[in-house]
Image: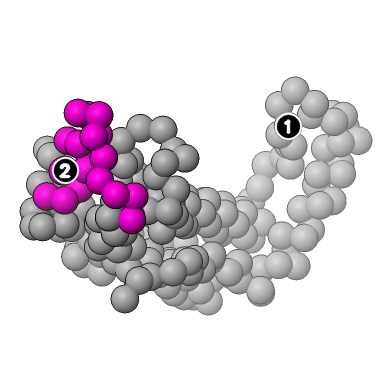
């Protein structure tokens, strides 16, 4: 059964923080009045943030950073979905493109762990979390995604190491291409589709798992840490 287009959902910014975030507009207006329009940098200075403002801003950065990663994951998934029908329109070997998309997915997926670690460090610096709590939360996240870690290690480190008929067929397509030969276009489409469909459902479900974990951690921290 083919997996059709279905995007990993974005994180939802906690609604109880929206009013505080909206208040940053006044800080931006003050910045414009004092410093003018940031034509070259495009960056607005909103001054030093403290207390609740800093906490809300940290949650905002967390939410937007993870959503940027989710956008990248969705691009990879949708490229894998589109590849079998569009391989003739895209330059390069389809085999190489699949390898690249798979590696890109894992790189982006585990960038969420780096963002999470930075956010936890920031909350610890604000006195919201202790060192022990940060360690415990990181451990909980690691346990929740350890299955994906094993999958990543199998496909990313060294060579992809894929096996089986589908991978053999994919290699055959590339070997024929290098010799100036080609299989029937429908046969190539089926081979590419079989290889892409191995990853697409996993990438979607694990992306949603990461998204749901982040949303739960975020909601719980807003509920328990905000003063």
Q: Residue 142 in the image: state x and y as whole percent.
A: 24, 62
Q: Is residue 156 visible?
A: no
Front-lying residue, 50 or 15: 15
User: Quadrant location of residue 31?
Assistant: top right
Residue at the (81%, 52%) spot, across then down: 25
Q: Which residues are magenta?
A: 168-186
Residue at the (8%, 53%) spot, across then down: 163
Q: Identify the secondary structure beneath mark 1.
A: loop
Q: Name the residue that disc number 1 marks.
A: 42
View extreme (top): residue: 40
State the CA–CA distance, disc 1 to disc 2: 47 Å
Query: Of helix, strand and loop, which mostly describes the magenta segment?
Result: helix
Q: Is residue 177 magenta?
A: yes
User: Quadrant location of residue 91?
Assistant: top left
On screen, residue 172 versus residue 106, left or right, reads left
Q: Tag on residue 95?
A: none
Q: Residue 10 in the image: state x and y as whole percent.
A: 54, 65
Looking at the rendered structure, the number of numbered marks drawn on it comes to 2
Q: Residue 70 in the image: state x and y as whole percent.
A: 47, 57
User: Quadrant location of residue 64?
Assistant: bottom right
Does 102 sit above or below residue 23?
A: above
Q: For mark 1, does the 10 Å Cα neighbourhood hold few (<14), some (14 to 19), or many (20 or more) residues?
A: few
Q: Residue 89 in the image: state x and y as whole percent.
A: 47, 40
Residue at the (39%, 44%) spot, across then down: 87
Q: Is residue 198 visible?
A: yes
Q: Are marks 1 and 2 in contact (CB under 8 Å)?
A: no
Q: How is the image coloured?
A: one colour
Q: Name the residue that disc number 2 marks.
A: 171
The quarter of the rendered structure image containing the C terminus is: bottom right
On screen, residue 159 versus residue 207, left or right, reads left
């Amino acid at each position: 059964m083919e997996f059709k287009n279905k995007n990993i959902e974005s994180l939802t910014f906690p609604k109880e923080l929206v009013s505080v975030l909206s208040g940053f507009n006044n800080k931006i207006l003050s910045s414009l009045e004092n410093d003018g329009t940031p034509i070259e940098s495009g960056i607005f200075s909103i001054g030093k943030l403290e207390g609740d403002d800093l906490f809300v801003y940290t949650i905002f950065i967390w939410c937007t950073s993870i959503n940027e990663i989710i956008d990248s994951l969705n691009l990879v998934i949708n490229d894998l979905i589109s590849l079998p029908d569009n391989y003739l329109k895209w330059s390069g070997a389809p085999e190489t493109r699949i390898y690249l998309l798979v590696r890109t997915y894992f790189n982006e997926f585990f960038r969420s762990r780096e963002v999470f670690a930075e956010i936890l460090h920031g909350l610890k610096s604000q006195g919201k979390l202790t060192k022990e709590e940060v360690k415990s939360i990181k451990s909980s996240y690691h346990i929740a995604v350890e299955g994906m870690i094993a999958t990543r290690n199998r496909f990313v480190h060294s060579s992809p190491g894929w096996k089986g008929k589908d991978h053999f067929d994919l290699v055959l397509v590339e070997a024929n291409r290098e010799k100036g030969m080609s299989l029937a276009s429908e046969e190539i489409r089926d081979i590419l589709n079989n290889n892409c469909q191995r990853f697409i459902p996993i990438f979607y479900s694990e992306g949603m798992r990461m998204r749901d974990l982040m949303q739960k951690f975020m909601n719980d921290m807003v509920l328990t840490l905000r003063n």
